[in-house]
Amino acid sequence: MQLLTIGINHHTAPVALRERVAFPLEQIKPALALFKEAWSGRRALNAPEAAILSTCNRTELYCATDDHASREAAVQWLSQYHGLREEELAPHVYALPQSEAVRHAFRVASGLDSMVLGETQILGQMKTAVRTATEAGALGTYLNQLFQRTFAVAKEVRGTTEIGAQSVSMAAAAVRLAQRIFDKIANQRVLFIGAGEMIELCAAHFAAQQPRELVVANRTAERGRYVAERFGGHAIPLADLPARMHEFDIIVSCTASTLPIIGLGAVERAVKARRRRPIFMVDLAVPRDIEPEVGQLEDVFLYTVDDLGTIVREGNASRQAAVAQAETIIETRVQNFMQWLDSRSIVPVIRHMHTQADTLRRAELERARKALARGDDPSAVLEALSQSLTNKLIHGPTHALSSASGENRDSLIQLMGGFYRHGQPDRAAARDAQAAPSAESAADTPSESSGSSDR
């Protein structure tokens, strides 16, 4: 089975491309169905397992498939789904096979691959992606095991290292940028557009600066009021935004809209009404809420998630010791997972051996029953049964020994010597062989270390 992760993130692609490859949450289930359907026309023996993780900083497709040409097929599908030319997307895509895919999943969930080093929001987003894939029937043994271990590793990293200590969040970075434009945020009116988790974080940081006014505009009035009242502000309908935009000095937007909700014309009118007083705008949404052309206006200071990332990275250097500790934990857990994956590869072989041996046993047993029914001597029948079954069972190993040469033959002799010593079966080795059928069931059972999600 081949594990593969393909995707783009804030390291490999600008926000202008990331927003074109993003999947709104409601599109992920049908997208997974289309992905599996696209695979059905290929020569893969089984439909792939798949999960899609889409955030403001990344879009990633996690796969488990028996198709070795899966990288090209996955990139092609991603391009076609979003209406992009493959050559336009491909230079920004990373493709991580096998252990690299495992290591990447562990690092992402632990906050090591985030723009905000050690942030915790990505773990919840990954759990949502897994739950969505499960509901879509797109997960199987391999990805389910991968993600359960991923959540356990993230919990271990956060519990045993200081990776999240003193992290500079996107919300804190927004406040720092605003303080470069305005001497005191306490004198400014602040508007938040949206009412999700990111807006709540930003509202908390700006509220600590005691702004002159704090307002939340949201599509759902009840949710908007809830967030506003938490921080001593009030809510307005989203429909009032064009008429009231000029009232605010600081605007922070983060919604789930697939299209911009603040256009160039609306901001031009707001600037004119403000008589050239500056507006500080932060667009934390992907796809973006504010048309990029707004940033070209005089007296408008527009920043995106990528712009805030520069400030965030300035605070990352002090946590490098925690990063090194986390990487050590992750590397050990990657090796553990790859051992489990290797053990899964022998399950079909073991299953086939038992099926073949049982077929031989049934054939010989039937022959013995017929002999007994004819009235043959029971002792002679049992002797013939044991000899015939023994000869057939050792035919494979005997043929392998006679055909082998050199080091291969020496290895076979050493291996088989564990089962036969001076013509007598090695009882310990025989017990191990009898326990072999449990390898399949053990491989399907999550180890104690894999744990459960810490949701």
Image (cartoon, helix red, strand yellow):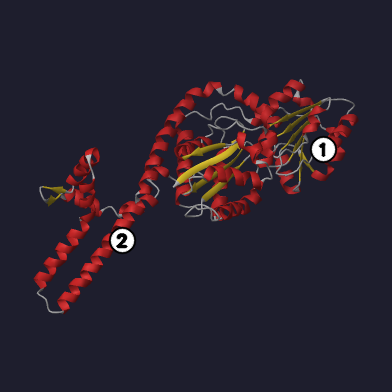
Identify which residue, 37 or 123, lies in the foreground: 37
Residue 295 at x, y = what percent?
79, 29
Q: Is residue 105 visible?
A: no
Q: Quadrant of residue 404?
A: top left
Residue 302 at x, y = what percent?
76, 29
Q: Secondary structure at mark 2?
A: helix
Locate residue 265 relative to residue 13 in the image: left or right: right
Q: Residue at x 64, y 43 (%)?
A: 79
- Label 1 crowd (10 A; few <14 / some 14-19 / many >=20): some
Locate residue 442 relative to residue 180 in the image: left or right: left
Q: Secondary structure at mark 1?
A: loop
How far is the residue under mark 1 from the one under mark 2?
A: 67 Å
Identify which amino acid the numbered label 2 is placed on.
Answer: Thr
- Label 2 crowd (10 A; few <14 / some 14-19 / many >=20): few
- In the image, is residue 82 above or below residue 15? below
Locate residue 357 relative to residue 12 in the image: left or right: left
Residue 438 at x, y = what percent?
31, 54
Q: Answer whether labels 1 and 2 touch (C-beta < 8 Å).
A: no
Q: Which residue is mark 2?
A: 355
How many numbered marks, from 0 up? Answer: 2
Identify which residue, 205 or 121, lies in the foreground: 121
Q: Residue at x 16, y 51 (%)?
A: 427
Please name which of the two marks, 1 or 2, marks the residue nearer to the observer: 2
Locate residue 443 relative to residue 260 in the image: left or right: left
Q: Quadrant of residue 228?
A: top right
Q: Residue at x 32, y 57 (%)?
A: 352
Mark number, residue 310: none
Identify which amino acid the numbered label 1 is placed on.
Answer: Gly
Mark number, residue 263: 1
Q: Is residue 206 visible?
A: yes
Identify which residue, 289 or 118, lies in the foreground: 289
Q: Earlier in the sequence, mark 1 or mark 2?
A: 1
